[in-house]
Amino acid sequence: MDVAPEIKDGRTMLPFRWIAQALGASVEWDEATQTVTVKL
């Protein structure tokens, strides 16, 4: 993980990509439309 977890308002925030990939999903970023696609 290239970004440290952050605690905000009593909740632990983790990067979405890290969580998705840990669960076996692939994550793609489309710069042109600025959208994220998650494939399980």
Image (spheres, rainbow, N blue to C red):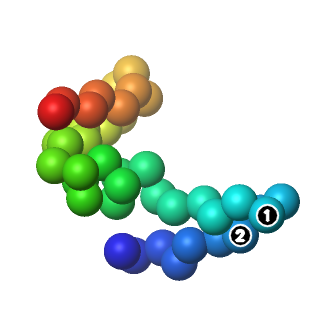
- Residue displayed at 18% across by 31% down: 39
Whether residue 35 is visible, yes or no, is yes
Q: Nearer the viewer, mark 2 or mark 1?
A: 1
Query: Label 1 crowding class (10 Å Cα cut-off): few <14, some 14-19, many 20+?
Result: few
Q: Relative to 33, is 11 above or below?
A: below
Proximity of marks 2 and 1: CB atoms separated by less than 8 Å:
yes
Whether residue 30 is visible, yes or no, is no
- Residue wearing tag 1: 10
Quadrant showing the N terminus: bottom left
- Residue displayed at 24% across by 38% down: 28
Query: Label 2 crowding class (10 Å Cα cut-off): few <14, some 14-19, many 20+?
Result: few
The residue tagged with tag 2: helix, strand or loop? strand
Q: In the depicted view, which residue is nearer to us: 40 or 30?
A: 40
How far from the left and from the top, in percent, is residue 33? 39, 21
As shown in the figure, which amino acid type bears the numbered disc 2? Ile
Quadrant showing the C terminus: top left
- Residue wearing tag 2: 7
Seen as rendered, the residue at the extreme right is 9
